[in-house]
Image (cartoon, grey):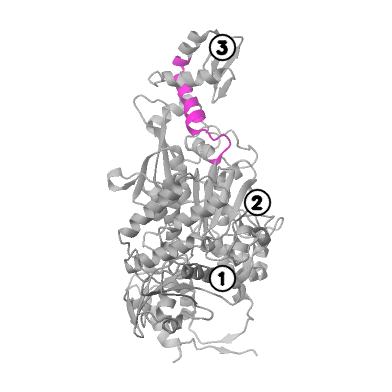
Amino acid sequence: MQALVIAAHGSHLNPDASDPTYAHADTIRETGAFDEVREAFWKEEPHFREVIRTLESDEVFVVPLFISEGYFTEQVIPRELRLDDWDPDKWESDGTSASQATLEATDVGKTIHYCGPVGTHDAMTDVIVQRAETAMEDPNVGDGVGLSVVGHGTERNENSAKAIEYHSDRIAERNRFDEVKALFMDEEPEVDDVTDYFESDDIVVVPLFIADGYHTQEDIPEDMGLTEDYRLGWDVPAAVDGHRIWYTGAVGTEDLMADVVLERAADAGADIGDAREAVRRLAASAAEAGTDSSPEPNAGAGAGD
Amino acid sequence: MTDVSVATDDIEALLERASDGVAFDGLHVTETDGEYALETPGNEWTGLDDAALRRALDSVAAYVTNWRYWQETVGGEGTARRAFLRWCERAPLADADPDAAPTGPRTGGADDADDRPGALGVTDRYDALRDGIDREWGQLSITARFVDIDAPDGERVYDLWHVEDAGRDLADLEIHDDPRDARELATYDEDGRYRPLKTAPTLPGGWAFTGLSGAELVETVEFFYPATVANWHRELRGNLDVDHWLETAERQTGIYDVIDELPREAVEWMTEACCVDSQCLRRREWQYEAGDDLAVDGGDGPFPCREPCSLVVAAARKWATLESEDEHTYELELTTSELNQLEELIDAVAEGRTDEIREADVYDGANRYRARYLRAKRFDDEGDLEATRVDD
């Protein structure tokens, strides 16, 4: 038997923070690729600490629903899962290239394949592009359009920015959008000055965050000048300094994220059969149906607590 | 018991296993040199040939179908899922450590009194499963019953609703059959407020899951009360792994690195504030550290709490900061009644009682008008209590 655990932050304050985790877990459950699928959280239940014992499978694939290789993925999750032999070096990563490490959870004696975060997987690039497509309701979006991938960024951990830049570079190499730029909340270049970095009239801004919350629904819209007050909402597109800004919700809510989770597990050796095709079909049909990519602004804490 | 229906299929399945010997829930089948022996608590046959064994098995249908349900349908020998489903119908628990733990949540409401002596044999269980066997798991009421009550074939299904809805007509409840629906039901309390702690005693009612399979029941219960089945099973087998306060606090990093500085007495106050029965259905098994118990009682909650949860860790960070402040002596003027009112205000908030205080009940010190009056009288223009620090 094999099990999948999707490890996410969750929130003590915001009931919506876990929605993307549940949605992606359910999508994967529908494929039947794993005997067991569990959501696990730092701030909700089941906690990382107690999730492995709820499984009957001997082989467990843990995929962190986090953006970058950093504090949570390198320290908190392995520690709380009791992966005693863990060391970040086991990922042999340059900051964005972690695939997996095979370890044992010492409370249950099970084999744990501890995967790199979804945010740095190559498949994430496609999710960002799909986000832009749904935002502009144009499956061929690119011509005449600038794309900004926005991340948290932090001076404390260079890997935070690396993940954002990694996907920006990959999208730029495809020569699909006229301009591509990585911008940050907490370091240069800052998202506040988004219009300074683009010549295109239309700029689609995709926040590389797992869940919508304080950062994506309050900070960034106000910082970019989409609205005076997040509580009043904003237009998509919104006119700022002579540009039209198409601001999407957190990329982590995109249906195609389930595919990234599956790929992470498959890269680590999970037998997933044709589950990826099923998920991609599902995500494509959802995208064609024109899913609303501009969720209502909501208050509450995000992943900061 | 004669109307229990045993399918040819059941007997064939059992015969396939007979040569290896079957010993389960009072049913014993052994084979020696082509001859079978069959034994149940009420009967014994020896020297049976194949045909005679079939006839004999047909006459103990309850034992055969019971064997089939547990060994073939449920399976999972040694798993928490199997033990939990056995507990649901009061079946003997093979892996229980008799010295270690209660054979179920310690307090299960009215049905707890007969809990420990009360494992049922197959005959009694089969009688009871026609009406349904009820158990309580926190605020959940679980009923195990036969799918077909008139001609039971051994197949069980499970119903689940809030303990407070146990007497209500099913037609008044919202019916669910997908375990995942439990996630949404467990997310908000009856006032629509977010429940970050799944074992808070604030689960709202009004819903029912009916006709769940055993696997679906466990999945549903785990969405309501994550990891409670696994930890109950560990406690049952006597191997619950408890992480005490200091171990947990010292493990923390980042913004929670400070919580191991929380003074010992503050840990006492914290557990009294957070980890008591009125706030959480879990029974605190963790102490200050191994061999150094906290004075506060761990409570009588049904589920073992094996380490401080994330809410306690997050709150401990706040208290660690607050407790690092120095104490001072302040002087402020209050009437005796005003001093009493401060106590009433703190009590009302601590007991979550503020919503219950009637608008015009000015006799309650935590009444809104009373509080506004006190503020108008005793706060200065900056909105602070007029108190003077008298030490340096």
User: Where residue B314 sits in the image (x, y, percent)?
Assistant: 56, 67
Residue, disc 2: A103
Viewer-nearest residue: B7 or B315? B7
* Relative depth, front residue between B285 and B247: B247
Real-space CA distance between mark 2 and mark 3, rounded to the nearest whole angstrom? 48 Å
Marking on residue A162 = 1
Q: Which residue is mark 3?
A: B36
Residue type of the residue flagged with mark 1: Lys
Cβ atoms under marks 1 and 3 closer than 8 Å: no
Q: Considering the numbered disc 3 on the image, is that residue within a helix, a strand or a loop?
A: strand
Q: Is residue B21 above or below residue B320?
A: above
User: What subunit carries mark 3?
Assistant: B
- Position of residue B107 relative to residue A22, above or below, is above
Whether B249 is among the magenta residues is no
Q: Give x and y (percent) for residue A117.
A: 55, 60
Q: Disc 2 vs disc 3: Cβ atoms closer than 8 Å?
A: no
Judge left or right: residue A180 versus residue B293: left
Does A149 sit above or below residue B294? below
Which of the image's four quarters has the N terminus of chain A? top right
- From which residue to which does the magenta span run? B57-80
Badge 3: few (under 14), some or many (20 or more) residues near its Cα, within 10 Å? many
How packed is label 1: few (under 14 Cα within 10 Å), some, or many (20 or more)? many
